[in-house]
Amino acid sequence: MKKIFLALALISPFTFHHSPCFAQDGPSESVLVRGSYRPVIDSSEKIFFPTDITDTAPATPHSFIYSITPTRLHALYEPARIRAARIKGEPTTKLYNNYLRLGMGNYWSPLADFYWSSTRDPKKTYGVRFNHRSSWGSISSDDPAENYGKNHFGLTGITLFGKYIVKDILQLSSDINYEHDHNLYYGFTDNTLQARMGLTRDDVSVSDYRAKYNILTGHFGIRNMELDANKLGYSLDLRLSDLWASWNQNEFNLNLSGDIHYGFNLGNRYKGVAYLRAEWDGYIRSFSPEGAMPLGYLLAVPTDTEKHHLNIVKVNPYADFMLNGLHFHTGFTAGWDAFTDDPEGTLFRFFPDVVVSKHLFEGSLVLSLGATGGINANNLNSIRQINPYVGPNAEQRATRHYDFTGHARWTISKKLEANAEVGYSLLQDDLTFMLDPNYSLGNVFMPLYFDNNRFTIGGDIAFVNDEILTLRLGGHYYHYSNLEGSVFLPPLTAAYYRPDWDLLASADVNYEDKWLFHLEGQLLGKTQADNGDELPMRYGINAEVEYRHNRALSFFLRMDNLAFQRYFYWANYPSQKGLFILGLTYTIPHK
């Protein structure tokens, strides 16, 4: 029996603060043939299951995540089989199964990223990932009205992972992850501290306004890799996580999801797959501050322990198939929301799950229309990653959304592609934030849930010249209407902390695979803060240069916020100005 070993050199660079992932080397394949014979690749269908790559870059402080709901496109085109071809045996090639990246930047900002995995085994894969990113600088000024002091933050994580394939049809996977994050509620000046609390910096300790988060996650999955017609396949995933944080916050999550799928023939040319997916997302949340709250808390510290049980259940039957030249993804989602504290109790909703697409002009133009929806839990872990300055015991609700989208992708030439999209969404309990009036310093936020209708239009165009030059330009416009907030709060005048437009332009140059250059410009429109202030338009220029000395050693310089703008993503929280980090990457080759 001829054996083909597939090995992946996985490189996952660490994301720099406010920067995208630059210079990421993709996975590579190596083919090793052993034995004395005339190697021939027979005509057969190839199923490739790559190792999962988990993005280890955590959410960074100062950034607000917003996006339109993505549209799923299902390509069911089945290419013609390639005739058998003879290949020439090659010697064993070097594999790069490890990765070490180290760097140091201004504001005392160290960076460390390490990855190691097993090699050359068609049945199993295992390894470890470690990353660290922190900053120990300050936003200082001789003027007490501009001195914000220390704005430290740190992100550290380690993951052990493994995967094993049984009899080429059953895949077992597991991983264990620990993550520690911390940040400061630094959004107050010396003048604010003196005027509202009668204190100076020397009177308070950093621990009085520092938030720490620890989360331990374990995952186990089993997946049947059967996708042939008239055969049944299945998958099951179990995920357990426990988050404990400052001021005795705790959140335990059990997520159980799975599906059963069945391939079927649709005439003589096409095939389809029918799915039945189900998910249970359950939480146990508790809060017991025991006499302490963040600096500036105005009320009596709670003494009783709060405990809540929150659950979301979703069932999603659908089918993917082709009919008369159209690609259909058709189904629905039934959702039970026992996560949101609502006077009606458990909320039951039906959501559409339909996407229809059409390939025109030999596939150069793809048009799609979709109507989808669902329920998403705004749990403690997700809320604090969106806004790291949210206070303890943040209110948690689930967002229910109905999304209607249209998308067009036009492949103008082999080097030029354009995308355009339009969307309209109906959102219930959409998440944004406002300053918590129970804190005197105006530096702690609370979740604000509101209903709204959102219209989005946008697009992008990309030019790629043989991987030597890549140019991209894109943007979006957002319009919010029918804003309805909580009855306990003043009427909303805007969708707080949501820009009404964004624009991104980038250029990448690869010079002889030796020098890599990246340049990026970003523009974000004005946003309305809940305190009545208008946060001005934000613009940023980021760049990176990497020199590859050889396949094992390279050096890089990252430069973020080259416009040296002191911008605000959140009211009273100015960002750092120009950020620079210098470092190297190194791998040890193995045969």
Image (tube, helix red, strand yellow):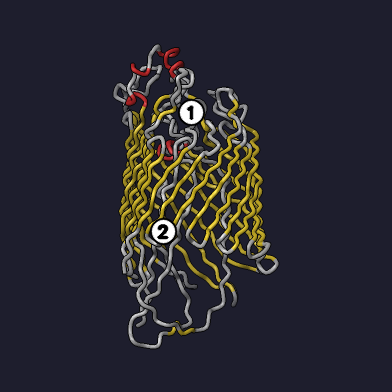
Q: Residues within 10 Å of mark 1 (few under 14, many from 20)?
A: some
Towards the viewer: 213 or 321 = 213
x, y percent for residue 582: 41, 45
Q: Residue at x 60, y 38 (%)?
A: 524
Q: Residue at x 56, y 74 (%)?
A: 79
| 343 up-or-down from 242: above or below | above
Residue 570 visible, this angle: yes
| Residue that lies at the very extreme toward the right in this rendered image | 361
Residue labelled with disc 1: 573
- Residue 549: numbered disc: 2
Q: Quadrant of the C terminus?
A: bottom left
Q: Amino acid at mark 2?
A: His
From the viewer's perspective, is 289 left or right of 280?
A: left
Q: Amino acid at mark 1?
A: Tyr
Q: Residues within 10 Å of mark 2 (few under 14, many from 20)?
A: few
Towards the viewer: 557 or 51 = 557
x, y percent for residue 22: 48, 51
| 172 up-or-down from 155: above or below | below
Q: What is the distance, in whole Å, between disc 2 and disc 1 at their CAs?
A: 40 Å
